[in-house]
Image: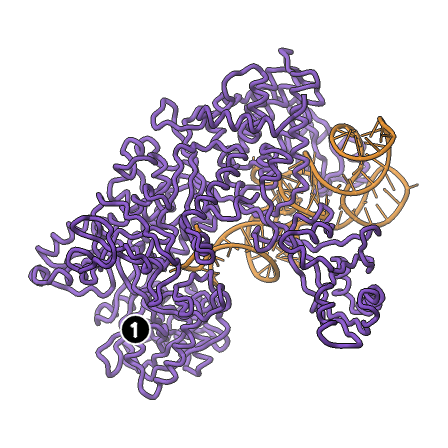
Chain colours: A purple, B orange
Amino acid sequence: MKYNFNEIEAKWQKYWAESQTFKAENNSDKPKYYVLDMFPYPSGAGLHVGHPLGYIASDIYARYKRHQGFNVLHPQGYDSFGLPAEQYAIQTGQHPAITTAENIKTYRRQLDQIGFSFDWSREVRTSDPSYYKWTQWIFIQLFNSWYNNDSNRAEDISDLIKIFEVEGNAKVNAVCDADVEFFTAADWNNYDSVKQQEILLQYRLTYLAETEVNWCPALGTVLANDEIVNGVSERGGHPVIRKKMTQWSMRISAYAERLRQGLDTIDWTDSLKESQRNWIGKSVGATVTFNVIDHDKVIDVFTTRPDTIFGVSFMTLAPEHELVSQITTPEQKDEVEAYIEATAKRSERDRMADVKTITGAFTGAYAIHPFTEKLIPIWIGDYVLAGYGTGAVMSVPCGDQRDYDFAKHFNIPIPNIFEGVDISEEAFADKEKTIIANSDFLNGLNYKKATKRAIFELEKIGQGQGKTNYRLRDAVFSRQRYWGEPFPVYYVDGMPQMIDAKHLPIELPEVEKYLPTETGEPPLGNATKWAWDTVKNDVVENEKIDNKTVFPLELNTMPGWAGSSQYFNRYMDPHNDQEIFSKEAINYWQQVDLYIGGSEHATGHLLYSRFWQKFMFDKGLVPHDEYAKKLINQGMILGTSAFVYRVSPNSFGFDSKGEEIIELIKRHPIFISRILFDELNKSPESVKGFNEDLKSILNGVFHGKLVRVDIKTNEIQPLHVKVKYINTSDELDIDGLKKDAEFGEDFENAIFISDNSRLILKNNNEKYIVGRDVEKMSKSKYNVVNPDQICLDYGADSLRMYEMFLGPLEQYKPWNTSGITGVHSFLKKMWRLYVGENGLLVNDAEPSKDNLKTLHKTIKKVQEDIENFSFNTSVSTFMIAVNELTAQKCTSKAVLEPLLVLISPYAPHIAEELWSQLGHNKSISTAPFPKFDASHLVESSKNYPISFNGKMRFTMELPLDMSKDEIEKTVLEHEKTQEQLAGRTPKKVIVVPGKIVNIVG
RNA sequence: GCUGAAGUGGUGGAAUUGGUAGACACGUUGGACUUAAAAUCCAAUGAACAUUAGUUCGUGCGGGUUCAAGUCCCGCCUUCAGUACCA
């Protein structure tokens, strides 16, 4: 019987689906285990071989845990709101819901064919109203909450109102906007409703605020940094400027310290935790208030080095700082305005990345130093970012390199306040060796003492105080997009009102166009039925808006991370329409035990979801304030792109010019093979020779009109070609390429030159070799490999094992199909261990000592590997086991049956099939994992490596119970040792029993 | 720029606490079987030198610690990822 993988795999996939083998129950006698993959976005291109990597790993773990006797929750769903579907809608007019549904269908088919043990009964989709009902619900909870620093948790906004009514806000210690005004209880009670709402917005955990965005006037929309290439929009190449816009924000900064400290309590990868720590960016220092000359305004700065306050020689504001326009003197106005306009064109990332270009402008205004009362010129510079700290810095050029460079560039004095330090070349940023000088009361103090003293003095004169600052900014929560969750918000007198939770979900309205409106409003501005009737409690037509009972609804939608910030809890009880999840469900499943996903989410999804979880914890909704106990990162499978090298048409000269020739050369693009390309690049001499060769080759094609071939190697252009036309020897299938539906036309009359500088013809055996490069797998690079064909050719089990075999899970690695044959022939070999030509070979024979040794060695290694997520090494272990058992001619059921359970998490289909052939009528999925018995591995001797000066020369078989002295004696007496020593006496002999012998001398 | 990760044969990678570098595969070469191919099996395969025995070099680069370094320490280089509206 042959290993007919297509048949076997289809059979068991059907069986699992019909028997609901992997359905998890919300109560069970077994211990629970929750394995989760990061939410996939169902892209239009479908699954490529890189996507399943993490899913295969988590599936192996989930299946392993089932063998260990756990009740395993392993759900899957779709983060189905997002830009690509919207982009497609803009281009084609097709509703994103349709695109998304189609994409999901493809995804599901592809996931099913790989044999994952997902509990599909729990599937969720973020774009489904029954799901986003709860996303809207959480938004309302956040709106109705504020963060109390005294209790260090989120509390209900109604409690805050009670405090305001009784005692005003003087004693309230909340995380709130920086500019709240103080008021008394009497003030509060006298305020009108709008004023009260304005004040409350300054405290709510989600609030409206002005935020800087990348505005593209031509597209009438806001762009992600991602959508901007070289300062212009990726789509259309239009200019982009920085602009302020009123948007919803989330007060994640309230949780900065808890998010930081929580990292110590969870088992996530160190690099990921480090990324989050840096992102949160705690710094301890002081705020300093500078008075501005001739103004009643003050400039607040935050500094981590208050000890260097006497080194301040200027101040720098972000060009966007709100005071800039007010303090700029008339003489400087033109220069400042021009500068502001110029920086508005640069993205934040550009400004941070580019430290070499120093730009700035003087405002003409001066601040007063709080201690020396000297005048300090106020500059603006784009190295200061508006969103960081207060958007202003006190510049200490002697102690900060950027300030130093700025001062040098603009000839601003650089006073030295460090004892015995030379600052003629660069700033001195070291804290450890700092001794302050030229600084009045700080003279002679070190960094720590001077900092303390400076803060003390600042507080004494009311010009500053000690402060801890976080880099973490509040998260912008609005998007000017269509395909996202609508806000459950309408506006009365410009003030946002929450729709009562019982009327949720507020469904996304239909629009004709997915573009912004002509007046620059978000796409929801195109909806004609998008108003809230407070009497009927329903969405009604816009024309009914009277601002008495019918009000306009919010036009923004929520960002991509909204739907993915609580989905892991929703999986516990996904169909509950009364609550986000039941108490029973969350108390049973508690939290995710293992979360597998990419590290690219480190500072996005993985931080925001921790924030929401902490908020939900404060609200008493979840039992843990961290939702994932353990998290591991999977790397990415990269594509191996293929390149052909096109010679520039400029390389050719003709004896007649004009249209005809240009057309001719365009119709016959010339491509040269890789090694030839490399050669031409390396040696200019070879170009000359090749010019002649090429000329004689081409003369026929161009009817003798070609008079000059002059190739400039820097004009040879590498072009991506589809990897499906490349074989394992990097040879190009020219015929296939010419017939390609998409690009065939471009290559129809192309001329291909081989590495031997010869024209490639159908019958002359010359080959075109492509260039290869490892890049991210992407449609635009034509290096995408689809798993469908691999499942068809080799089967899902081969795909699963091969993806694991490729290398460590967390590493980035290129995809290369050639190795899959090795894994596939392993599965065939394993099949032959169980099944011969005339049926099952397995019998009740007593296992031999060697059989048992192989089995238990394998059990030990595989169990260790799974627990360490080292799946690649287990695949090797299986290969070794099957090689050994085949050589031993093992047929013993006592060995071969447990081996199936070992391999079942990796290759579940073949394991199920052989398991049933062994006579089982129940799925292998819950068969107990074999127990390791060390007694089968006991060895009596060791093949010692004998080294001389650390270099291994030969090995010696010695009993393991031999003493150190005996080993030394035996080794030294050995003739090969004498040979190596050649009469010398060893200076020293190192014997590590069970490991190594090293002879020095 | 900042932050994080990685770098080992022709290729993917292995190497438990510092202890035989290159397991397991792919590829390549040679062989068996076959009319032939596929499939399968066997052997060789880091580089250089050497008739053999063997020797020397070798884990991105330069140093260091150690009886012993892919592994530890210091200084660099290169590549990739994230960088706040891609998901």
Quadrant location of residue A940?
Answer: top right
Chain hosting mark 1: A
Q: Which quadrant: the C terminus of chain A?
A: top right
Horizontally, residue A677 falls left or right of residue A439, namely right
SS label for mark 1: loop
Residue, x 72% and y 23% (percent of image)?
Answer: A887
Quadrant location of residue A268?
Answer: top left
Quadrant location of residue A531?
Answer: bottom left
Percent of width and height locating residue A460? 21, 69
Between A433 and A120, the one nearer to me in the picture: A120
Residue, x 57% and y 48% (percent of image)?
Answer: A812
Percent of width and height locating residue A158? 15, 50
Which residue is identified by label 1? Answer: A322
Figure check: A201 above or below A965: below
Specify the farthest residue to the bottom. A331
Is residue A49 visible in the rendered image? The answer is yes
Percent of width and height locating residue A878? 62, 29
Type of amino acid at the residue the image marks with label 1: Glu
Figure check: A503 above or below A793: below
Is residue A306 visible in the rendered image? The answer is no
Horizontally, residue A313 falls left or right of residue A909, namely left
Q: Which quadrant: the N terminus of chain A?
A: top right
Between A807 and A584, the one nearer to me in the picture: A584
Horizontally, residue A617 falls left or right of residue A757, namely left
Q: Label 1: few (<14), some or many (≥20) within 10 Å?
A: few
Figure check: A867 above or below A527: above
Percent of width and height locating residue A328? 31, 82
Horizontally, residue B27 falls left or right of residue A85, namely right
Figure check: A182 above or below A158: below
